[in-house]
Image (cartoon, grey):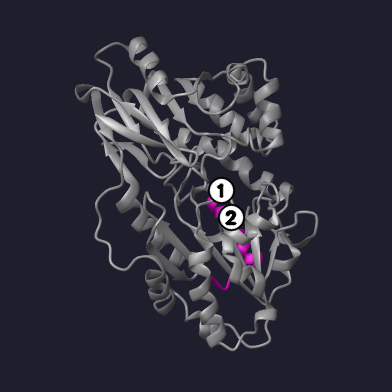
Amino acid sequence: MRLELGFGTGTQPLTVPDENILAVLKPNQVEIGLTGADEVRRALREPIGSRRLSEIAKPGEKIAIVTSDITRPMPSALVLPPLLDELAQAGCRREDITVVFALGSHRPHTEAEMRRLVGDAIYERYRCVDSDPADCVHMGVTDRGTPVDVTRAVAEADRRICLGNIEYHYFAGYSGGAKAIMPGVSTRDAIQSNHSRMVEREAAAGSLDGNPVREDIEQAVSCCPVDFILNVVLDEHKKVIRAVAGDVVRAHRAGCRFLDTLYLKEIDSRADIVVVSQGGAPKDLNLYQTQKALDNAKHAVKSGGTVILVGSCREGFGEKTFEQWMTTAPTSHSMVERIAEDFQLGGHKAAAIAMVLEDAEICLVSELDEKLVSEIFLRPFGAVQTAFDYAFEKHGTDAKVIVMPYGGSTLPRVRG
């Protein structure tokens, strides 16, 4: 079988003997109705657990629209126009609306990146800003002790509208919903407090009830209320195939249920070799983002197996603390020990990689320097086929193989 795996803005070819393939985890076939902007408009007309946005917003109110940064595939340029039309129906003025890019712990945007995210017309007609962790308002504390410190443009708004795409998240359960606030527009200390719960067993992909990270996130919005969300689910071509709008929890849960019908993949057994791609740009911009595909792949690989992680990582590590942990650790296991005693945002990603290394070898197909990759306990390759040939020789001609072309989205679960 010949496959093409996303890699940066292009693809990489892979050929696997048919008899060795256990599964190729592509999205399930589901019935799709409207798509793209038409589906977004339908969701806005049919909000879940809420009145229409045009009935909620009032003329003269200061409105903050929180949307994703450049590391996310959220199609803000497509989603924003129908949303802004709803606000116009409510009599809201352009000068009262601010689009806030939720950076979380990521780097600020260039002007060109902001324009690309929302489109020239919106960028030139509306105020568009990055969240600023240095200018936040303290709005409360969750029961778990997480400070709710929110960037001023959002904290001081009369109405808060959160956008996002829903996919699996390796410890928050799913992306989307209240994540636009926490960690989206929060301080590093707040994010660190929330994410420290990732080491708890219930903090896992596809988990909502009892997930301490997700519960903490959603309690944060009791301090910083969200008036309306508009979330989308994308197919493997990053096309909107479902939109949900309305209440920050109820609409989000409806989106999560649809995601499961699309991307939850049952498998008969784990494989000796798992080949996983983050799906290409922008998801594989750096190793910090590419790690998400690895964390889904760990559910499909046998103990002692090999994961071939495919991601361009052309911007390097993507986060300073993550880089420091990865490049200074004496052993991979030392990062597992360290995170239990000294949780640090950024270090949590390093520990997540190290936890996979406890049970499997990781081959990284990337644009990173091979010496650097070797120093961070991964085996470097420039081509996925070369990496596969290495793993195939290692595990033998009877090796079973699972391929995950959209690893950041698809979540394997062994039947039973």
Left or right: 133 in relation to 360: right
Structural crowding at the residue carrying mark 2, measured as other residues with C-alpha within 10 Å and reported as few (<14), some (14–19) or many (≥20):
many
Q: Quadrant of the C terminus?
A: top left
Q: Residue at x 50, y 52 (%)?
A: 73
Write the residue at 26% across / 32% down.
23
The x and y percentages for residue 412 are: 34, 38
Q: Which residue is mark 2?
A: 217
Per the picture, the main secondary structure of the magenta-coloured stretch is helix
Q: Position of residue 120 (x, y in %)?
A: 60, 67
Residue, disc 1? 213
* Residue 213 falls within the magenta-colored stretch: yes
Q: Count residues near mark 1 (Cα–Cα under 10 Å), then give few for <14, some for 14-19, many for 20+.
A: many
Spot occupied by residue 203 in the image (x, y as percentages of width and height): 51, 42
Front residue of 270 and 126: 126
The residue shown at (62%, 85%) is 92
Q: Is residue 250 visible?
A: yes
Q: CA distance from mark 2 to mark 1?
A: 6 Å
**How many numbered marks does the figure carry?**
2
Residues marked 2 and 1 touching at CB (< 8 Å): yes
Question: Amino acid type of disc 1?
Answer: Val
Q: Secondary structure at mark 1?
A: helix
